[in-house]
């Protein structure tokens, strides 16, 4: 049953969602307290970022025991309770499988590093140094520096695409793969409905470990994803666990273009239901070999439309799209691409409209539904290791960016913008905790919070509620074929979604300047109005222009 095609998924970043015990760190009992809030929003499934036992070097994306809940979040019993209470409210639970790498504190790695003939040696990827002692190749880590870490005990390097505390697992080893499938069975037997799979596109490595053809020491590129045996592994996983349990799956398809995405998501291939792709989120990044996401360029609506259209067309028949602008790795869209001052509410709802109108499964990230914004902290007040590593590498050591240029990029794109505590009300620490939060609350919490949003009829929250309900009531949202109108227009985002019996017309002004003329569209009415983000939405027949960030959905 393809329930996920009609679903809206809500992502929870548990450490920042709700703290129930005053230790400044969100937890599972906190999530349980907020289930009614989530059910009322109308979402169907909750994806929880990792809550397994972890040294938290990368906020839980470094797992040291996949079958135990980290005590910071609660106990296994809390998780079983959360699953039951979510199910009782019709909410499905999706867990985060981090299986490209583990923590260096996982028992497997502690064994693996002991000796070359340890039975767990081959669970990870160990290689000799080159003759001059340098790493086996020039592969770079996503978090700066080389992807290889020297280990003195056994005198070899091990591979880590992320932190050195996140050694990559060796999927070539069938026993390792069986361990992964088994831990998935463990959680599915407890009632977990699906998996988000962290960097799943990277699990297969080219066994010749070729260097990139570049003078750079630390390159991140094509060898980091879509390796030779990736799809074989996914089909095996499907056979072994996904199919038997009827699991819903969404993989992180890092490095995938449309053609690569079809290989993951074509149902005939029996791999994954859908993947997260990144090209639309790179619209404001300049392609460089060294600067990664920190090379910023201005938001370009025409490029965004073009990119989204490519995916809508590409996966229309054999595959399925994810729809997202935010997650725990991305900044707040209203600050990054919209206008978080004068037009915060209008631009937040405009971005929501153009996204949720598309074909695919929408993902809402906690706080997006109340229009949470970026936070311009000083460098020292950010927590994320990605930021501090990049500063050391790009600003201090290689001097590729000035401190000012780097901070401009941080203020736009840092992951911590998404990770500040959820803003529940106007009380101290935004009602997230009675203690001291692990990361500072966004200073605008008194204005932007759930309590205020619930009290206000025209809030962003209530708009999301209507948008979600609409998606469920009109089948054209699920099936309608996408067509982009006015592709070159720099202010308007306009498209239709068409089935044999219905047409949706989504039209939005994605700029802070009014559009004063009726856009000339190659569609004919009569249309009825389904939704608009301003009071007194004009009928299609009387549409004379659009106010700043005005967004409307019409249907015939
Ligand atoms: O992210 C994988 C990924 O592709 C990253 O490069 C991501 O684009 C980066 O965070 C952007 O700055 C996943 C998780 O979502 C992320 O939180 C983890 O840090 C990472 O894997 C390692 O597990």
Image (cartoon, rainbow, N blue to C red):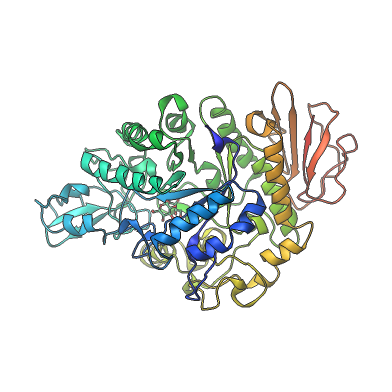
Q: Residue most toward the right?
A: 542
Which part of the image, by quadrant, shows the C terminus?
top right
- Residue 513, relative to residue 477: is it above or below? below
Q: Residue most toward the left?
A: 117
Of residues 500 and 254, the one drawn nearer to the viewer in this rendering: 500
Of residues 53 and 59, the one drawn nearer to the viewer in this rendering: 53
Splitting the image into 4 quarters, where does residue 503 fall?
A: top right
Going by the image, does 248 lie left or right of 178? right
Q: How many marks?
A: 0
Going by the image, does 132 lie left or right of 438? left
Of residues 157 and 371, the one drawn nearer to the viewer in this rendering: 371
Going by the image, does 205 lie left or right of 254? left
Can residue 327 be seen at all in this image of the molecule? no
- Residue 31, relative to residue 527: is it above or below? below
Residue found 30% across the figure and 33% down from its top = 229
Residue found 85% across the figure and 36% down from its top = 540
Splitting the image into 4 quarters, where does residue 517 fall?
A: top right
Can residue 353 be seen at all in this image of the molecule? yes
Rendered location of residue 324, percent (x, y)? 57, 46
- Residue 278, relative to residue 2: is it above or below? below
Rendered location of residue 104, percent (x, y)? 26, 59
Going by the image, does 459 lie left or right of 162? right
Rendered location of residue 79, percent (x, y)? 44, 58
């Amino acid at each position: 049953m393809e329930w996920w095609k009609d679903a809206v998924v809500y992502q929870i970043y548990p450490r920042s969602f709700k703290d129930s015990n005053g230790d400044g760190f969100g937890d599972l009992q906190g999530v349980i307290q907020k289930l009614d809030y989530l059910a009322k929003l109308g979402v169907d499934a909750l994806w929880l970022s990792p809550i397994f036992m972890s040294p938290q070097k990368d906020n839980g994306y470094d797992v040291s025991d996949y079958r135990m809940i980290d005590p910071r979040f609660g106990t296994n019993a809390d998780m079983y309770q959360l699953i039951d209470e979510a199910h009782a409210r019709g909410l499905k639970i999706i867990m985060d499988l981090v299986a490209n790498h583990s923590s260096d504190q996982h028992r497997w790695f502690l064994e693996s590093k002991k000796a070359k003939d340890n039975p767990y040696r081959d669970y990870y990827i160990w290689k000799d140094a080159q003759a001059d002692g340098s790493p086996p190749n020039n592969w770079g880590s996503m978090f700066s520096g080389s992807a290889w870490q020297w280990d003195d005990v056994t005198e070899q390097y091990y591979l880590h695409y992320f932190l050195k505390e996140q050694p990559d697992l060796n999927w070539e080893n069938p026993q390792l793969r069986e361990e992964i499938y088994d831990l998935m069975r463990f959680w599915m037997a407890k009632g977990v409905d699906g998996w988000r799979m962290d960097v799943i596109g990277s699990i297969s490595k080219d066994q010749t470990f070729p260097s990139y053809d570049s003078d750079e020491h630390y390159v991140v590129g094509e060898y980091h994803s879509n390796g030779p045996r990736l799809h074989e592994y996914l089909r095996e996983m499907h056979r072994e666990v996904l199919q038997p349990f009827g699991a819903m799956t969404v993989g992180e398809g890092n490095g995938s273009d449309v053609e690569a995405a079809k290989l993951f998501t074509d149902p005939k291939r029996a791999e994954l239901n859908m993947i997260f792709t990144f090209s639309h989120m790179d619209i404001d990044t300049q392609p460089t070999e060294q600067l990664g996401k920190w090379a910023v360029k201005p938001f370009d609506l025409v490029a965004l439309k073009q990119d989204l259209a490519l995916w809508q067309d590409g996966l229309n028949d054999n595959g399925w799209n994810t729809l997202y602008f935010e997650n725990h790795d991305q900044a707040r869209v209203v600050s990054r691409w919209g206008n978080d001052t004068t037009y915060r509410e209008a631009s937040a709802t405009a971005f929501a409209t153009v996204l949720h109108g598309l074909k695919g499964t929408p993902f809402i990230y906690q706080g997006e539904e109340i229009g949470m914004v970026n936070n311009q902290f000083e460098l020292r007040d950010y927590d994320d290791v990605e930021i501090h590593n990049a500063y050391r590498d790009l600003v201090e050591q290689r001097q590729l960016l000035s401190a000012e240029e780097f901070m401009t990029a941080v203020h736009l794109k840092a992951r911590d913008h998404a990770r500040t505590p959820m803003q529940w009300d106007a009380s101290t620490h935004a009602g997230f905790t009675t203690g001291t939060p692990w990361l500072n609350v966004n200073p605008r919490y008194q204005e932007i919070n759930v309590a205020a949003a619930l009290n206000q009829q025209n809030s962003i929250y209530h708009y999301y509620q209507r948008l979600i309900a609409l998606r469920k009531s009109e089948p054209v949202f699920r099936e309608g074929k996408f067509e982009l109108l006015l592709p070159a227009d720099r202010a308007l985002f306009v498209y239709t979604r068409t089935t044999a019996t219905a047409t949706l017309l989504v039209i939005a002004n994605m700029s802070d300047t009014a559009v004063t003329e009726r856009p000339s569209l190659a569609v004919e009415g009569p249309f009825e109005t389904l939704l608009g983000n301003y009071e007194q939405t004009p009928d299609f027949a009387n549409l004379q222009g659009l106010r700043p960030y005005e967004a409307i959905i019409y249907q015939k």
